[in-house]
Amino acid sequence: MSQDINTEIQNAYEVIKDGGIILYPTDTVWGIGCDATNPEAVAKIYKLKQRAETQSMICLMNGEKMMYNVFKDIPEVAWQILDLSEKPTTIILDKPRNVAPNIIAPDNSLGIRIVKEPFCFKLLERMKKPLVSTSANISGQPTPIAFKDINPEIIKGVDYVVNLYRDKIAGKPSTIIKLTNDSQVKVIRK
C-alpha cells in the first residue's frame, strides 16, 4: 500500500467529513461522492450534475456490517448475487435507513455496491459510513471512461479531486440488479 493512497484517503476523508464532495476513482468509472448520510452534501452532487433528485444515486459500502446498518432486512438472494458476481454489481434493496433522505429513490429503495478496490474500501473503513457514488458527468452527457474525459465543470465543482489512477481506462459501469423484500429479482443493467 503506497504512501500516496493513504494520503489521498486522508485528504478525501477530511473533505467528506466536512460535508464536501469528491471526484474519485471507483471499481468501475470515475465517481462523484460524499457522505451518504449528509443531505446537504448529497444535494450539492445533484446540483453539480444538474440532475433531478428523483433520480437516485447509489452508495458504496465495504461489507456486511455497513449493509445491515442501512437495511434491516436483506434477502438471502442478495448475498448469493454478491458472492457469485465476477464483476462489480449494484443491488437495489428496499427500505433503506440511516442515510440521507434525498439519496433514497421515490419507491423507497437504494442501490448499493460492495467495493473491494483498495482506495474506496479503505476510505469507507475510515468513514464508517456509506459513500455516495454517481458517474462523473453532467446529467444526460456520456459517462466518462477516463479521467481526461471528465467535464471541466465537474472537476471545478467538486471540493477535492483524488490524485490516483488518472491514466486508468475504466471498465464498464456495474451490473444493476433490483431485489424487493418479497424476493423479486429484476436485472436493470447488464
Image: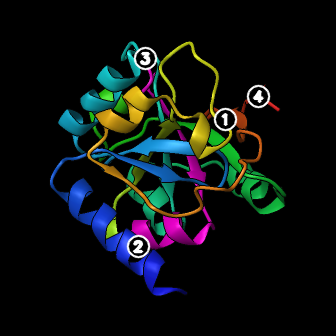
Q: Give the foreground label among 1 and 4.
A: 4
Amino acid type, residue under disc 4 in the picture? Arg
Q: Mark 4 points at which residue?
A: 189
Amino acid type, residue under disc 1 in the picture? Leu
Of labels 2 and 1, earlier in sequence is 2
Q: Name the element at disc 2.
A: helix
* Residue 29 picture location, percent across and down: 63, 44
Q: Name the element at disc 3.
A: loop
Q: Give the foreground label among 3 and 4.
A: 4
Of labels 1 and 4, earlier in sequence is 1
Q: Can residue 62 be seen in this view?
A: no
Magenta segment, which residues? 104-125
When the figure is inspected, residue 149 is found, relative to residue 1, above or below; the finding is: above
Image mark for residue 179: 1
Observer-nearest of 39 and 160: 160
Residue at 43% across, 31% down = 152
Q: Quadrant of the C terminus?
A: top right
Q: Name the residue under label 2.
A: 125
Residues at marks 1 and 4, CA–CA distance in whole angstroms: 13 Å
Residues at marks 3 and 1, CA–CA distance in whole angstroms: 15 Å
Observer-nearest of 50 and 110: 50
Of labels 3 and 2, earlier in sequence is 3
Q: Can residue 63 be seen in this view?
A: yes
Q: Give the foreground label among 2 and 1.
A: 2
* Residue 59 picture location, percent across and down: 47, 45
Estimate how packed mark 4 is, as few (under 14), some (14 to 19) or many (20 or more) residues with alpha carbons within 10 Å.
few
Q: In which quarter of the image is the N terminus?
A: bottom right
Say whether residue 39 is magenta.
no
* Residue 3 picture location, percent across and down: 44, 86
Residues at marks 2 and 1, CA–CA distance in whole angstroms: 26 Å
Q: Residue furthest left?
A: 18
Left or right placement of residue 106 versus residue 40 in this view: right
